[in-house]
Amino acid sequence: MAIDLYVHDCGSIVIFLPNSPAAREWFDENVERPEFDWHGGVVAEPRYAGPIINAAVEAGFSVRRGRGL
């Protein structure tokens, strides 16, 4: 199974890396992006990670979580 969304918990920030065209489109439509991104990923505070991950899973995307990069 291909992973649609990688989530890297770096402690004080969480980096979301959409890995499929559908996940990138969903992210663009459903997650407010900051004015910058990190190599195609979205940087967020840890408090936002749970709701974003839950919404992505509910939308049918596969998610892989990890610590650091």
Image: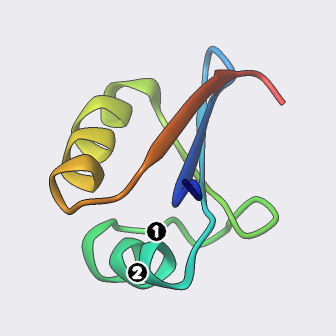
In the image, what residue type sits under mark 1? Arg
Q: Are marks 1 and 2 in contact (CB under 8 Å)?
A: yes
Q: Pointer 2: residues within 10 angstroms few (<14), some, or many (20+)?
A: few
Q: Residue at x 22, y 38 (%)?
A: 51
Using the rendered view, name the quadrant where residue 59 is placed. bottom left
- Indicate which label's residue lies in the foreground, 1 or 2: 2
Q: Is residue 23 above or below residue 54?
A: below
Q: What colour-coding does the image apply?
A: rainbow
Question: In the rendered view, does 36 fall on the left or right side of 1?
Answer: right
Q: Classify mark 1: helix, strand or loop.
A: loop
Outermost residue toward the left in this view: 58
Q: Classify mark 2: helix, strand or loop.
A: helix
Q: Earlier in the sequence, mark 1 or mark 2?
A: 2
Q: Which residue is mark 2?
A: 28
Q: Residue at x 29, y 54 (%)?
A: 56
Quarter that holds the N terminus: bottom right
Q: Which residue is mark 1?
A: 33
Q: Is residue 14 above or below residue 19?
A: above
Residue 3: x and y in percent read 57, 54
In the image, what residue type sits under mark 2? Asp
Residue 13: x and y in percent read 60, 29
Q: Residue at x 35, y 58 (%)?
A: 61
Question: In the rendered view, does 46 fall on the left or right side of 32?
Answer: right
Q: Residue at x 33, y 36 (%)?
A: 48
Residue 68: x and y in percent read 77, 22
Residue 18 vs residue 15, the one in the foreground: 18
Residue 2: x and y in percent read 59, 58
Outermost residue toward the front in this view: 1
Q: Pointer 1: residues within 10 angstroms few (<14), some, or many (20+)?
A: some
Quarter that holds the C terminus: top right
